[in-house]
Image (spheres, grey):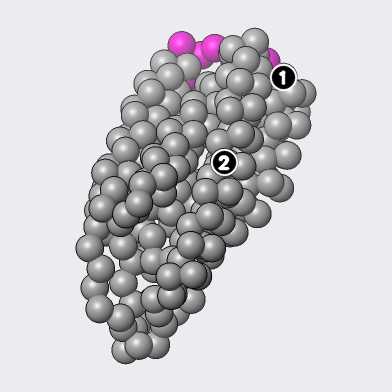
Amino acid sequence: MAACGDGCCSTEAAPPRSGGALTGTAQPDDHRRTVLSRRVRLFVAATITYNVIEAVVAITAGAIASSAALIGFGLDSTVEVASAAAVAWQFAGRDPERRERVALKVIAVSFFALAAYVTFESVTTLVGGEQADHSTVGITLAAVSLVIMPVLSYAQRRAGRELGSASAVADSKQTLLCTYLSGVVLVGLLLNSLFGWAWADPAAALVIAALAVKEGRDAWRGDHCC
């Protein structure tokens, strides 16, 4: 009997699957797997499109406002594009399960690279004492992402779990991380703009780095079932 309580696993364990796939879920038939694979590709395409736009806007606005949090947010979007591209590559093959382990490693490395850069920039900003300027564009972008990202994440995670794909679930968690980051960045930008708390922006960026390390570790281990 499975011990998961979040809907990831069914009550009867299924035989283990290779390539890092989720275990414990009822396996869909071939037709259903084709439908789910097509659905995952659709969600991945939507994620890539939105995050390319988000990255350009966030990095540009962050550079103008000298905001480490906004630049980190934009870089997370590029990481999410890399993550989604890895999943797209996986499902473009005839046997996605054979490519799953490689896709998970790409996602993990992307997380670690993001964490390293954001940590460096945040510490530099805190030590240098440079204050980020107000950014209306950044605040608006973070608020919009806070609405869009949970929808994409939930839809892809649901399809990935039914399909039994650890990489699809890992990528959906990357998208969910974007939701958390949107909230953190939004709070940091507002505190800086409203109260002049210069430390709020780089502190928000450090939260981004910490979350990225955690998700990167999970992706590397393939720990995305429950």
Asked if marks 2 and 1 touch (Cβ < 8 Å), the reply is no
Three-letter amino acid code at disc 2? Answer: Ala
Q: Which badge, 2 or 1, comes first in the chain's sequence? A: 2
Q: Residue at x 70, y 32 (%)?
A: 141
Q: Quick one: quadrant of the C terminus?
A: bottom left
Q: Residue at x 61, y 34 (%)?
A: 49
Label 2, residues with CA under 10 Å away: few <14, some 14-19, many ≥20: some
Q: Nearer the viewer, mark 2 or mark 1?
A: 2
Q: Is residue 7 magenta?
A: no
Q: Main secondary structure of the magenta part?
A: loop
Q: Quadrant location of residue 83?
A: top left
Q: Residue at x 44, y 79 (%)?
A: 5
Relative to the observer, which residue lies in front, 110 or 189? 110
Q: Which residue is mark 2?
A: 45
Q: Which residues are magenta?
A: 126-134
Whether residue 209 is visible here, answered yes or no, is no
In the picture shown, does residue 82 fall above or below 122? Answer: below
In the picture shown, does residue 126 fall above or below 128? Answer: below
In the picture shown, does residue 99 fall above or below 135? Answer: below
Q: Position of residue 102 (x, y in %)?
A: 26, 44
Q: Quadrant location of residue 216?
A: top left
Whether residue 18 is visible here, answered yes or no, is yes
In the picture shown, does residue 187 fall above or below 96? Answer: above
Q: Position of residue 145 (x, y in %)?
A: 67, 40
Q: Position of residue 149 (x, y in %)?
A: 63, 47
Three-letter amino acid code at disc 1? Answer: His
Q: Position of residue 180 (x, y in %)?
A: 56, 46
Q: How many marks overall?
A: 2
Label 1, residues with CA under 10 Å away: few <14, some 14-19, many ≥20: many
Relative to the observer, which residue lies in front, 86 or 66? 86
C-alpha gap between disc 2 and disc 1: 32 Å
Which label sits on residue 134? 1
